[in-house]
Image (tube, grey):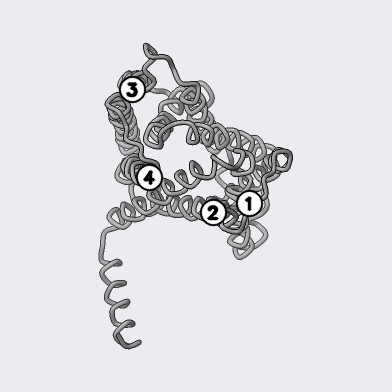
Amino acid sequence: MTVRELGTGLSTAGRRWRGLSANTRAILWMLLGTAMFATMTALIKALAAHYDSFQISFFRSFFAFLVFLPVGLIQGLPALRTSCPMLHIRRGLVGTSSMLTGYYSVAHLPLALSTSISFAAPLFLVVLAVLALGEIVGWRRWLATAIGFLGVVVMMRPGQGIDPAALVGLAAAALSATSVVLTKKMPVSERQITILIWATLVSSVACLPFALWRWSTPDLADFWLLASVGLVGAAGQAIWLHSYRLGEVSVVGPIDYTRLIFATIIGFLWFGEWPDTWTMLGAAIIVASTAYIAHREARLRRNIPRGPGVA
């Protein structure tokens, strides 16, 4: 293929891409993002056999910070300034706790099960939105939330003895929801890149002393795997945010559940895992309930009266 033919092909592909609707492009971006997150989770599970969670979390945060910082510098110093540093630190510490507990869950549970438990975060978010943000939640969303937690109980099979790692994964979901609440408390003037830079910086600093305490020097191959956790995570996060900016939340949000499909496939091919009936049933209940909550919230937002001149 000549350079001219390659250029023509890329130009045609670009026109076709731009010809797609915003929602279609957002869905495709989200699919790519969820695949990257599932890949990152699999890398964490593989590395957890040889490295401490603090060390993995440090690499995850530090290399993501190295990605986000230049982006902030390109946008100028205002992207690095903040009017609420303590709120960023609190959010960063909560996010770090969510990351550490989540990684423990990933290391000790089948990939599909740990991914399914992470979907409980929107259920906790409904409760925290009422308690911390004073939001009003109707009976439909409360019912959907209760059904979702029933799905969590189904997955954990209390009659057979609850795996402590599943409880740790549930704590990670609750901490993830808390991080979202803290994000909502930030001034609207805070840039997304500012939030990402602060979050990864705080996590890097918080994890480093504990990582050094239980440090295991990686060989060159493992070093690149550890770095890839941060790089893939940063890319997935950026793609995830871009997809939400590009498309409607009610359309794009449910695509995040394809993480379970990717996690199941990767878990089977890489680790020889296959989710049992209880995991799939519980996951189906959680996905259905959280999808309904997202749909209901999007519908309520569309029905909010808009004053003159409000876009």
Q: Amino acid at mark 1?
A: Pro
The location of residue 147, given as percent across then percent down, is 32, 20
Sequence order check: which comes first, mark 3 or mark 2? Answer: 3
Q: Amino acid at mark 4?
A: Pro
| Picture mark count | 4
Q: Which residue is mark 4?
A: 308
Q: Which residue is mark 2?
A: 225
The location of residue 79, given as percent across then percent down, is 62, 56
Q: Which residue is mark 3?
A: 151
Packing grade of label 2 (10 A; few <14, some 14-19, many >=20) is: many
Circles 3, 2 touching at the beta carbon (< 8 Å): no
Closer to the observer: label 3 or label 2?
2
Closer to the observer: label 3 or label 4?
3
**In the rendered view, would you say 5 is above or below 99?**
below
Q: CA distance from mark 3 to mark 4?
A: 43 Å
**Residue in the image at 36% along x and 55% along y:** 29
Sequence order check: which comes first, mark 3 or mark 4? Answer: 3
Residue placed farthest to the top in the image?
A: 159
